Amino acid sequence: VEIGMSVVDARRLCPDLISVPSYGTKYEAITQNIICHLLELLPEDCVEQYSIDECFLDITPVANDYFQAAKFAWHLKTMIRRIENLQVSIGLSFNKSFAKMATKLNKPDGLFIVREENLDVIHRLPVKKMWGIGHRMEIRLHSLGIRTIGELANSDFHAIHKEFGINGVILRKIARGEDTSGISQHVERVEKSFSHNHTLSDAIYDDSRAMDEIKRMTE
């Protein structure tokens, strides 16, 4: 069972799965409170909210090396436990992509550092663990004999470009540790449309039940 999987698929794999309600508004409020505290420690242009429960930080203003970075990360973990009583996993690295992957390597409540000297911990992971690679691309990479992130990093540039175009080139650069993306700032937009989605606890196949659910969501 993995993040992003539908409840129906998850229950197919794990029939005894226990599903609990989600409270998106509450989660967002908690995230905003944490970010407010982060902005007391870092400049605004060093903080990027990536999702409802993830953010990227550029901590170079407060850390000159990995030792100072780890010390600051432990301070953040302690602060978040104090203000929201939550565990967090933090990944530290020299770029955003590897930092994000590092958060998965010592869960729960973990801290993991990926440096140039220990890239093998990333390179031995399956390609599907890399940010930006879904199931279909994984299958196509397997057809080329590429099953790990390290194999993607060492793959032939021209073969990857021919098969995947610019997206493949970018993913190969990420696998090689060449992600140069920085912190993205939120830009206010005028909303042109609104949407609402909701995952049902059980699959429904009756048209009338489906219409009732659609009406409820649009109220």
Image (cartoon, rainbow, N blue to C red):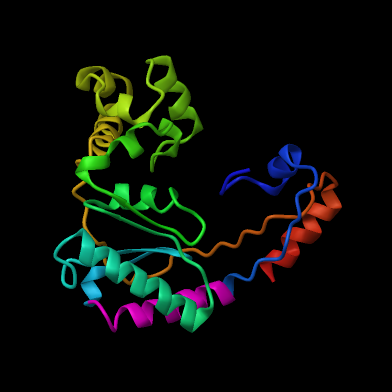
- Residue 21: image quadrant is bottom right
Residue 202 can be seen in this image: yes
Residue 187 can be seen in this image: no
Is 182 on the left-hand or right-hand side of 198? Answer: left
Q: Residue at x 57, y 48 (%)?
A: 4
Is 153 on the left-hand or right-hand side of 129? Answer: left
Quadrant including the C terminus = bottom right
- Residue 200: image quadrant is bottom right
Q: How far from the left and from the top, in percent, is residue 56?
A: 32, 62
Q: Which residues are magenta?
A: 26-42
In the rendered view, would you say 91 is above or below 142? below
Q: Residue at x 74, y 66 (%)?
A: 216
Is 47 covered by the magenta stretch? no
- Foreground: 57 or 157? 57
Q: How far from the left and from the top, in percent, is residue 34?
A: 42, 78
Image mark count: 0
- Residue 159: image quadrant is top left
What's the magenta bit mostly, secondary-structure-wise? helix
Q: Residue at x 52, y 58 (%)?
A: 108
Quadrant including the N terminus = top right
- Foreground: 2 or 214? 2
In the rendered view, would you say 135 is above or below 181? above
Q: How far from the left and from the top, in percent, is residue 192?
A: 44, 64
Is 152 on the left-hand or right-hand side of 14? Answer: left
In the rendered view, would you say 6 is above or below 70? above
